[in-house]
Amino acid sequence: MAIYDKNGNALASIYDVDGISLTTAYDVNGDICYSDSMGYYERKFSTYVDSYIHDNGLYIDGVPSTKEEITEWLLNRNNCIYRGKLSKSGKYLVDKNGNNIDLQGIGTHHLTQYSNLHTLNSLRILKYCGINCVRMSAYLLNHNFTYSDGQSSPGYIPSPDSIKAEMDRIIGYCVQLGLYVIVDWHVWSGGGEHLSTSDAVEFFTYFANKYYNVDNVLYELANEPFSDTLADIVSHCSTLRTLIKSYVTNPVLITGVRSFTDGATEMYEALQAENIDDIFISQHRYSGGASLSKFQTWWNDGIPLFITEWSNTSASTGTQSDMNITDGNNFLNFFHQNHIPNCIWKFTDQTMAYSAITNRGTINNSYYVNGAILEGDFSEYGKFFFDRYGAYAFTS
């Protein structure tokens, strides 16, 4: 094993008297302070715990606490375990006590095609990255997002049972872990998809009825309905809003807009005209999309933003060199300072600019199921966001 300084930098290797490399180190209290079985962000999280104790002592809000209690509290203080059911208050997302919450999430890709990534272990690791929300994207039609094995997978309309089963599995894991989870009707115009409201009614009936008393679950009524009319989107949202609220008390509802660059005002005003004021607006954003000043204007105009998909790369597949570091930092600061919930795109290991995990040439990587996710398993894109999400979650 290696010895690490407070910044997580390896200083040396250590061996026992027989020359065997040690796998675990203990502090003076007998607690494990390093283990080879710890993943990269698990180890990084332990430095946040040490920093907290250094600055605050063994106390939580002035109450004497053990290191184990502080570790559990710091890891979970911004998720459902401590914050409970979320709701909309004006343009803000608030917790069970009416306090602003910083929701930091990541989206899945085509659910059944990448089901190997959706394990209890991989979602647990996301907590150590500062993530407290997972957005589950239910594509509607068949798609083949080419991978090394050329695998393709059906969407919800041709195969509803398989999509429901995968979503149920992810929700179960998120409930265990205290993560919030967004049930996303993922209309993708690039795949020829439309709102398909009648199918959406069946979809949301299933989830609202099944999870009506589960505080973790949020509902995205329409992702990027670029190929549908404004009137049809408003009608779609109104129908699903009434449906979900017949099961769920005060649900968190979200809808996408008709444009990558300038759809938030149009959607907000159209919903307001129908006296619908309990739906968040999700204006997605990639490089070349709406400027930060545009988002600031929307926010200052009172539009309740909930950014369920964004990146500091282009919307094309691209490569990791496509990242705009300054752009990403500016948007992250804006979202964090204003408590605007946001989910990056996406939790895959594809060779794409916006894949948070590195490509291994196969989709059957055992580290998602067993053992830790190590530093080299995260892409530069993933590390960019997770480093910052972790700092927001565990220091502020």
Image: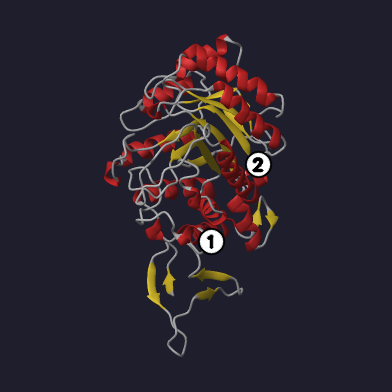
In the foreground, 220 or 301:
220
Dot 1 alpha-carbon crowd within 10 angstroms: few under 14, some 14 to 19, many 20 or more: some
Residue denoted by label 2: 83
User: In the rendered view, would you say 308 is above or below 266?
Assistant: below
Dot 2 alpha-carbon crowd within 10 angstroms: few under 14, some 14 to 19, many 20 or more: many
**Which residue sits at x=54%, y=15%?**
234
User: In the rendered view, would you say 40 is above or below 283?
Assistant: below
User: In the rendered view, would you say 177 is above or below 225?
Assistant: below
Which callout, 2 or 1, points to the residue nearer the camera? Answer: 2
Residue 54 visible in the shown view? yes
Q: Residue furthest front?
A: 158
Q: Which element type, helix, strand or loop, lies under badge 2? A: helix
Q: Which element type, helix, strand or loop, lies under badge 1? A: helix
Instruction: Tell me residue 21's x, y (percent).
Output: 44, 81
In the foreground, 315 or 162:
162
Sequence-wise first label, 2 or 1: 1
Would you say the residues marked 2 and 1 are in contact, meaning their CB atoms lie under 8 Å apart? no
Q: How many marks?
A: 2
Instruction: Tell me residue 205's x, y (percent).
Output: 66, 29
What numbered label is drawn on residue 50? 1
**Which residue sits at x=35%, y=44%?**
146
User: In the rendered view, would you say 263 is above or below 78?
Assistant: above
Instruction: Tell me residue 246's x, y (percent).
Output: 71, 24
Which of the image's four quarters has the N terminus?
bottom left
Horizontally, residue 73 falls left or right of residue 228, namely: right
Q: Amino acid at mark 1?
A: Asp
Q: Amino acid at mark 2?
A: Arg
Residue 252 visible in the shown view? no
What numbered label is drawn on residue 395? none
Q: Residue furthest bottom?
A: 18
